[in-house]
């Protein structure tokens, strides 16, 4: 569903939001798209276990835990951060995943960096037997195939398609299905210039660009400015945004409209990739630092 913002923008620009955050109550947005064909593949292979990786507040961990339960898989999450072992009860994301039946292996940050090495995976196979491996963030060929279904025929009229980026899988799918007259703009939620190469692994098209000015200092980093923007946006449009991904993208687009980046009469579509489950965990951190929090209800 595309929701047009009723706000007035200068130069007859219009902005709509594709509400991918609403496609499933627990497996929201792009994580649903990325898992769809992977779940089918795991079933085809008669796999019984899904194994994947993620950080403390990972939308992907939460999504795999729930989708695994719904589809009859045992799920195992390799979680970055040894210290989280004793803090599951305080962490809304991990608690949710555990309640879905996910089993955790907590590893140090150093160990976590080795997660793609064969010795690391062999150890896990010794421990758990065969499993279907879903990479960190869920990005693989089948995930891109799922993300190619985000844009549909009803989106042919938009000039700009905007999307937040973590690993680049989601935007690669969107780029593949965008039409030649459309420009896809990606907003990295983290610092680093490796993303262009990552995206090019999965797409040959060139109708896209990265906007790298709105990562707010890096992955998971936020400030009071961003929180105020997210709360304002929610209040005005009745659309919640998450602080890690979609909030930064929407902030960027509004700033770019103000700075006349977009031609007159541009029709802009924001992809709301979900991530709302992460707000609770972020609010706990903000409260501890005595900073303003993100409104869950307005
Ligand atoms: C995971 C995630 C992203 C990033 O998707 P990639 O395919 O890794 O680029 C963007 N938005 C939300 C809400 C996410 O949870």
Image (cartoon, rainbow, N blue to C red):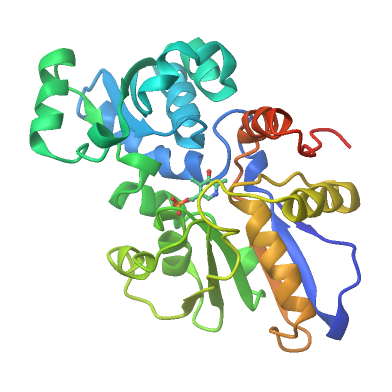
Question: Residue 61 appears at what percent x and percent y?
Answer: 44, 30
Total of numbered circles in the picture? 0
What residue do we see at 50% from left, 14% from top? 88
Question: Residue 33 appears at what percent x and percent y?
Answer: 47, 44
What residue do we see at 61% from left, 34% from top? 278
Question: Residue 37 appears at what percent x and percent y?
Answer: 36, 41
Q: Residue furthest front?
A: 289
- Report the side of 78 relative to 5 (left or right): left
Res 240 visible: yes
In which quadrant of the rendered view does residue 102 lie? top left
Q: Residue 149 versus residue 143: which sits nearer the camera?
A: 143
Q: Residue 231 versus residue 96: which sits nearer the camera?
A: 231
Question: On screen, 100 above or below 284?
Answer: above
Question: On screen, 257 above or below 278?
Answer: below
What residue do we see at 61% from left, 43% from top? 274
Q: Residue furthest bottom?
A: 263
- Report the side of 212 relative to 54 (left or right): right
Question: Residue 12 appears at what percent x and percent y?
Answer: 85, 82
């Amino acid at each position: 569903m595309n929701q047009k913002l009723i706000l007035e923008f200068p130069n007859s620009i219009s902005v709509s939001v594709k509400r991918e955050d609403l496609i499933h109550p627990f497996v929201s947005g792009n994580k649903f798209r990325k898992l769809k064909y992977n779940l089918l593949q795991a079933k085809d292979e008669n796999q019984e276990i899904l194994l994947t990786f993620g950080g403390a507040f990972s939308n992907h961990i939460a999504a795999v835990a729930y989708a695994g339960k719904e589809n009859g898989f045992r799920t195992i999450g390799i979680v970055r951060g040894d210290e989280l072992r004793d803090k599951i009860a305080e962490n809304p994301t991990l608690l949710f995943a555990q309640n879905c039946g996910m089993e955790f292996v907590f590893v140090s940050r150093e160990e976590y960096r080795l997660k793609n090495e064969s010795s690391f995976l062999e150890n896990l196979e010794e421990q758990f037997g065969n499993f279907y491996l879903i990479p960190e963030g869920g990005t693989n060929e089948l995930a891109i195939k799922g993300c190619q279904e985000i844009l549909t025929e009803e989106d042919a009229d938009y000039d700009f398609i905007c999307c937040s980026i973590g690993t680049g899988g989601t935007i690669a799918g969107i780029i593949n299905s965008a039409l030649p007259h459309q420009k896809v703009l990606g907003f990295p939620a983290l610092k680093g210039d490796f993303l262009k190469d990552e995206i090019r692994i999965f797409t040959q098209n060139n109708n896209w660009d990265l906007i790298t000015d709105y990562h707010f200092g890096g992955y998971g980093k936020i400030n009071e400015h961003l929180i105020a923007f997210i709360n304002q946006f929610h209040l005005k449009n009745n659309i919640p945004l998450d602080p890690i991904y979609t909030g930064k993208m929407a902030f960027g687009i509004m700033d770019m409209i103000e700075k006349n980046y977009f031609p007159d009469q541009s029709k802009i579509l924001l992809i709301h990739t979900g991530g709302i489950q992460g707000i609770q965990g972020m609010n706990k951190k903000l409260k501890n630092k005595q900073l303003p929090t993100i409104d869950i209800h307005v």
